[in-house]
């Protein structure tokens, strides 16, 4: 064969092909990325496919909040993290909803966001969707698979979702203890102090990583709170992994030893169609956006309980904090019932070992007696003896469907108002299922639920509003255990409103008035303690107050404790900084409660902008007498047009109740 090659023509054709290739790749590049802005246009999400890998980044105004951060899931039968192509990008859709909460920081909520969905296809032609929603207070996204499969063979082996922070970012993080460590092998139980203002990139002290929610400050640009919500029975609870080299934090799964160890897999088993929990990135220029955000409930499924009339937020007396495991006996409980009834509180929580110290028959009689005084009983349960070594009883009554239903029916017949279930076993899918099964069954028998030794609720306070509160915090009990914890209490209490309590109700069990608690010296002031039930949101607030303290309270303090709400119509962040101080105002009907605490051992003058308040409010101020260790109480008028000045004592506080 005689080939005559026209070299210039070949070169020209080659160039044309190269130009076409460039144009093609430009077309592909354009169609494989998109942007979505928040309704107020301040937040901008950018999605791109980079060499077949999906990434997202986020800007607040012109400034970077998150750099290119990885996305994707590895399913047992396929990989959705690399070699992907974009097959569809939806148009921007404005989504909006209005909903009510029975308890929480706000009773009526309007939520608006811009939604965009990208469909990605892997080399096996399998598809995954990522749904993004950008609201004025942040970015959320979740993974979805279509199709139909309930064979039980599919699982999610890992998730590569990352959050890449700029170098100058600082973090306030909750180290998550390793599984099956700690007292009675009870960890992880979300009971640690936070690391404060740590440069990003430092590893967690534990292999288990960092618990949600995690707070970050990106230079001078703004604040970010990472968490997750709407976790159902089809996933595990997630956390951030131990390693964050380069400021890149990644979603991690529970540890293998959690729950019942090898019996329960780490990888969640899924059916198709499938929706993952939402990954939420709450973002604000100011901390106000973080503290007031309702994103955790905005993205949770609506209530599954039709008749919610049995769910009544309220205040509870509780002997355990001061008198421990053997205090659930009748004499002590009568003493606490008297205090609870006198204060007009709705509940008395009878803690562990009541089944042995009082017994089912006598507790039923006691429940009747309490009811006559207008008080409902809440009874304690050990979730199971199997995943840890806690010996407190009743045990093994709520971990299987049959036993749980028998027990809950018995409680309903006895007129019990709620249960506190303690000592859970981690964050595996099996544990998430147990939490949700308990809520569902409790609802059938009109029981409210308080989880302790537990994970953070992931939007469950909306979906199952009978979940009135949850511990998942290093609470007041730790202050009573050890002087070191007591010394850290002021600072710790000034971290929680910016972190843990943003996403869900929190059972810290506040208010101790004695200087000495067991062998520990409390360092917070009296007014600091009295401010806490306003600073901390909990659908049922279990007070640490003992009857001998309640008797000694000034009349105005008793009046305050009698009226304090535990479900709020409105919450306003007023001032503060994590670990230093915080001032929060909350409203119920026409009554405002404004409370502040000082996390530092130096007195401080605060100039507060209360211009959001209506005019003509009168009420009572409870604060610390700077001269001595006692309360200063006075009548007060608030003018919203003037700056409100208040001086806080070292580790001091204040609370105002006004109408
Ligand atoms: Ca605990």
Image (spheres, helix red, strand yellow):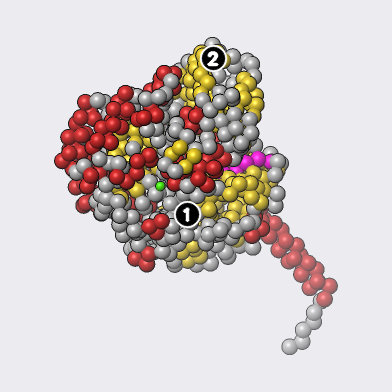
Q: What whole-number distance in Å separates the C-alpha atoms at marks 1 and 2?
A: 47 Å
Q: Secondary structure at mark 1?
A: loop
For residue 457, which quarter of the picture?
A: top left
Query: Residue placed farthest to the top in the image?
Result: 616
Q: Which residue is the site of mark 2?
A: 636
Q: Is residue 13 above or below residue 355?
A: below
Q: Is residue 374 above or below residue 328?
A: above
Q: Is residue 395 above or below residue 342?
A: below
Mark whose residue sits in front, 1 or 2: 2
Magenta stretch: give its range. Answer: 221-225
Q: Position of residue 416 (x, y in %)?
A: 24, 36
Front in this rendered view, residue 529 or 29: 529
* Magenta stretch: dominant secondary structure: strand
Q: Secondary structure at mark 2?
A: strand
**Image mark for residue 238:** 1
**Image mark for residue 612:** none
Front in this rendered view, residue 214 or 229: 214
Q: Is residue 383 left or right of residue 189?
A: left
Q: Residues within 10 Å of mark 2 (few under 14, many from 20)?
A: some
Q: Is mark 2 within 8 Å of ligand 1?
A: no
Location of the N terminus (image quadrant): bottom right
Q: Residues within 10 Å of mark 1 (few under 14, many from 20)?
A: many
Query: Residue placed farthest to the left in the image?
Result: 361
Query: Residue placed farthest to the bottom in the image?
Result: 1
Q: Does the residue at mark 1 contact the one at mark 2 (Cβ under 8 Å)?
A: no
């Amino acid at each position: 064969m005689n080939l005559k090659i026209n070299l210039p023509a070949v070169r020209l054709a080659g160039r044309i092909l190269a130009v076409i290739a460039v144009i093609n790749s430009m077309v592909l590049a354009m169609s494989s990325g998109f942007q979505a802005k928040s309704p107020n246009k301040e937040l901008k999400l950018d999605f791109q496919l980079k060499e077949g890998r999906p990434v997202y980044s986020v800007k607040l105004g012109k400034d970077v909040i998150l750099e290119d951060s990885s996305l994707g899931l590895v399913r047992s039968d396929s990989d959705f993290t690399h070699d992907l192509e974009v097959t569809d990008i939806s148009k921007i859709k404005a989504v909006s909803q209005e909903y009510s909460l029975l308890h929480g920081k706000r009773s009526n909520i309007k939520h608006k966001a811009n939604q965009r969905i990208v469909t990605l296809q892997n080399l096996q032609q399998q598809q995954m969707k990522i749904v993004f929603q950008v609201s004025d207070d942040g970015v959320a996204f979740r993974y979805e698979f279509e199709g139909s499969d309930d064979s039980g063979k599919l699982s999610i082996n890992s998730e590569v979702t990352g959050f890449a922070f700029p170098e100058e970012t600082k973090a306030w993080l909750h180290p998550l203890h390793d599984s099956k460590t700690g007292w009675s092998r009870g960890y992880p139980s979300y009971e640690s102090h936070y690391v404060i203002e740590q440069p990003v990139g430092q590893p967690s002290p534990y292999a288990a990583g960092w618990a949600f929610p995690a707070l970050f400050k990106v230079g001078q640009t703004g604040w970010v709170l990472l968490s997750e919500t709407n976790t159902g029975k089809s996933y595990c609870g997630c956390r951030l992994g131990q390693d964050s080299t380069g400021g890149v934090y990644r979603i991690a799964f529970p540890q293998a030893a959690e729950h019942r160890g090898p019996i329960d897999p780490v990888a969640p088993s899924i059916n198709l169609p499938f929706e993952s929990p939402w990954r939420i990135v709450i973002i604000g220029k100011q901390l106000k956006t973080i503290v007031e955000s309702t994103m955790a409930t905005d993205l949770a499924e609506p209530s599954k309980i039709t008749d919610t009339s049995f769910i009544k937020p309220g205040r509870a007396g509780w002997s355990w904090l001061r008198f421990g495991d053997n205090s659930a006996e009748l004499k002590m409980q009568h003493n606490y019932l008297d205090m609870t009834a006198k204060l007009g509180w709705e509940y008395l929580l009878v803690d562990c070992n009541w089944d042995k110290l009082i017994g089912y028959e006598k507790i039923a009689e006691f429940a009747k007696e309490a009811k006559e005084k207008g008080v409902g009983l809440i009874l304690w349960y050990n979730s199971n003896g199997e995943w840890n070594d806690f010996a407190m009883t009743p045990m093994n009554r709520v971990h299987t469907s049959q036993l749980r239903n028998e027990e809950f029916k018995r409680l309903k017949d006895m007129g019990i108002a709620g249960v506190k279930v303690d000592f859970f076993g981690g964050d595996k899918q099996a544990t998430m299922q147990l939490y949700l099964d308990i809520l569902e069954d409790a609802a059938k028998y009109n029981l409210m639920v308080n989880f302790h030794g537990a994970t953070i609720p992931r939007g469950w306070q909306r979906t199952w509003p009978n979940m009135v509160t949850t511990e998942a915090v290093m609470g007041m009990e730790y202050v009573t255990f050890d002087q070191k914890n007591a010394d850290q209490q002021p600072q710790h209490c000034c971290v929680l409103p910016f972190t843990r309590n943003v996403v869900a109700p929190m059972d810290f069990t506040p208010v101790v008035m004695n200087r000495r608690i067991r062998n520990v010296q409390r360092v917070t002031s009296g007014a600091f303690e009295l401010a806490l039930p306003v600073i901390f949101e909990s659908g049922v607030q279990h007070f640490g107050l003992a009857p001998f303290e309640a008797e000694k309270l000034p009349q105005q303090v008793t009046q305050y404790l009698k009226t304090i709400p535990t479900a709020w119509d409105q919450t306003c962040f007023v001032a503060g900084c994590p670990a230093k101080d915080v001032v929060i105002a909350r409203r119920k009907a026409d009554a405002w409660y404004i409370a502040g605490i000082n996390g530092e051992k130096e007195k401080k003058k605060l100039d507060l902008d209360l211009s959001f308040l209506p005019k003509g409010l009168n009420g009572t101020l409870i604060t610390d007498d700077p001269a001595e260790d006692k309360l200063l109480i006075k009548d007060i008028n608030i003018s919203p047009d003037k700056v409100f000045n208040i001086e806080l004592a070292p580790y001091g506080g204040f609370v105002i109740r006004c109408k």
